[in-house]
């Protein structure tokens, strides 16, 4: 009994210490996001950003894609084009379940970067960068043409997170 408990604890510790490299932008961009947005990793979270006309939604899950409550959380989405300082920023507020929502006037072009800041209760603040109109075809063709086993390793590393 003690040996099996030790094995479980060691397995959990190893799973928790996997490198963040298992969650690359290429990995997220090569998979469809649940709500049709773009996925990124921010600390212990997987974040999906969905932009619609004058509305922005942020979905929060853990590394096993389980919903994380947004209750009591706050966020901000800052819109940047090129190297200019962000000119537009939208406050994100809890919108039920694992979602934060904001509304405002903004536009998204292929050059737009959206920097999202998220603070959930009793957790450290996190941030990440989204490029919602980044062409996916380049990412997929690069992965296919490379024939590099590293891509498969990234997927396997991400799959391993299911054991958290």
Image (tube, rainbow, N blue to C red):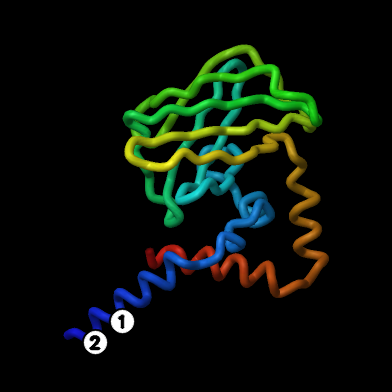
Give the vertical position of 51 relative to 19 (above or below): above
- Could you classify mark 1 by the number of other residues whose Cα lies within 10 Å: few (under 14), some (14-19), or many (20 or more)? few
Q: Position of residue 44 (x, y in %)?
A: 45, 51
Q: Position of residue 60 (x, y in %)?
A: 44, 40
Nearer to the camera, 75 or 94: 75
The structure residue drawn at horizontal position 66% and vertical position 51%, both measured from the top left corner, is 25
Q: Is residue 29 left or right of residue 46?
A: right
Tell me whether circle 2 and circle 1 mark residues in contact (CB < 8 Å): yes
Quadrant (top left/top right/bottom left/bottom right) for the N terminus: bottom left
The structure residue drawn at horizontal position 50% and vertical position 41%, both measured from the top left corner, is 126
Nearer to the camera, 61 or 137: 61
Instruction: Name the mark on residue 155.
Output: none
* Badge 2 element: helix
Q: Is residue 17 left or right of residue 11?
A: right
Count of labels in the image: 2
The structure residue drawn at horizontal position 56% and vertical position 35%, both measured from the top left corner, is 49
> Residue beneath label 2, please?
3
Q: Is residue 96 left or right of residue 76?
A: left
Using the numbered discs, state the Cα–Cα distance from disc 2 to disc 1 in whole angstroms: 6 Å
Q: Is residue 160 left or right of residue 50?
A: left
């Amino acid at each position: 009994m003690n040996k099996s408990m030790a094995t479980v604890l060691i397995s959990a510790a190893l799973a928790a210490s996997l490198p963040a490299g298992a969650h690359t932008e290429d990995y997220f961009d090569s998979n469809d996001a649940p709500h049709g947005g773009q996925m990124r990793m921010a600390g212990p979270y997987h974040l999906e950003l969905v932009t619609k006309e004058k509305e922005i939604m942020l979905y929060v899950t853990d590394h096993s894609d389980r919903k994380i409550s947004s209750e009591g959380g706050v966020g901000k989405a800052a819109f940047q084009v090129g190297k200019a300082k962000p000119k537009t920023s939208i406050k994100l507020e809890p919108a039920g379940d694992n979602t934060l929502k904001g509304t405002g006037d903004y536009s998204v072009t292929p050059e737009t970067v959206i920097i999202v800041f998220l603070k959930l209760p009793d957790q450290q603040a996190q941030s990440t960068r989204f490029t919602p109109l980044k062409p996916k075809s380049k990412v997929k063709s690069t992965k296919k043409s490379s024939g590099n086993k590293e891509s498969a390793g990234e997927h396997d590393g991400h799959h391993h997170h299911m054991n958290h």
